[in-house]
Amino acid sequence: MKRFSLLLLALIIFLAVLQGCQTSSNEIPNLSVIKEQIKNYHKSGKYNADLKTIIKKAKDEFNRIKPKENSLIIFDIDETALSNYQFGLDYDFGYNEDIWTEWVDSKKATAISEVKSLYDMLIEKGFKVVFLTGRNRNHYDATKENLISEGYSKFDTLITRKMDALKTTAVDYKSKERKQLVENGYVIEGTIGDQLSDLEGPYHGIQVKLPNYHYMVK
Ligand SMILES: [Mg+2]
């Protein structure tokens, strides 16, 4: 009888632990914990290691292409060509239009060196480059200056978002702009971005998806 009671007790404890595990796995993660995880992802070098792996694969793929005169690669800007990670840290990963405009105008975004090395290789090989960004038209001048000061000085066009495109999704806006580029005679061989919305839709060529865990653009 005593043995049966002990077994019953063990079973109850086991079920209680199992229940606890299930509850904790269903909990919504705490925002502060996620912010720390993102900081550790960058601080630990994992972000750079992931970038290195992705860019190496991209270089291998683009190296197999012999560019024609109109071969084009599309680069996104934020968290692709340029990093705004410092902006994220400064504002605890918060966002509003005013502080974002102030940051863009400061032109303090820095080149992401792995991406810059891919850009350099593509320019060297004879590909054309177009920057296609979700930044709006008011940010055109500051964005252009920031790109050039960070070494992205050779590109055919910088496309910013017109006011009438602000209400469309990023996928629609970027797809339409890519379609226009194709109609203008370019052959899009590849698209590089940190968001799926940079890469989805028609006319993208080889898709290179970079990591970004601190915001999502649909
Ligand atoms: Mg981006």
Image: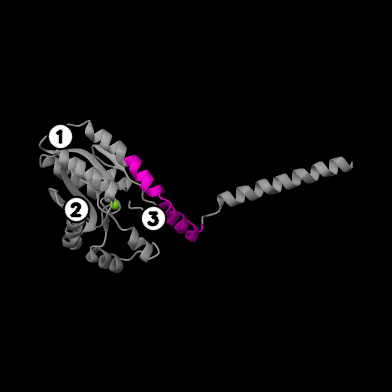
Q: Position of residue 80 (x, y in %)?
A: 28, 50
Q: Residue at x 43, y 57 (%)?
A: 39
Per the rendered image, the range of residues in magenta is: 30-54
Q: Return the disc, 2 or 3, that comes first in the chain's sequence.
A: 2
- The N terminus lies in which quarter of the figure? top right
Measure the C-alpha gap from mark 1 to mark 3.
34 Å
Query: What residue is disc 3 on?
Result: 214
3D distance between C-alphas at marks 2 and 3: 25 Å
Residue placed under numbered mark 2 in the picture: 151
Q: Is residue 37 magenta?
A: yes
| Residue drawn 59% across the image and 52% down it | 24
Kindly report which numbered mark, 1 or 3, lies closer to the viewer in this rendering: 1
User: Mark number for residue 26?
Assistant: none
> What kind of residue is marked 3?
His
Please report whichever mark, 1 or 3, sits nearer to the chain's N-terminal start.
Answer: 1
Q: Secondary structure at mark 2?
A: loop
| Foreground pick, 104 / 151 | 151
Callout 1 environment at 10 Å: few (<14), some (14 to 19), or many (20+)? Answer: some
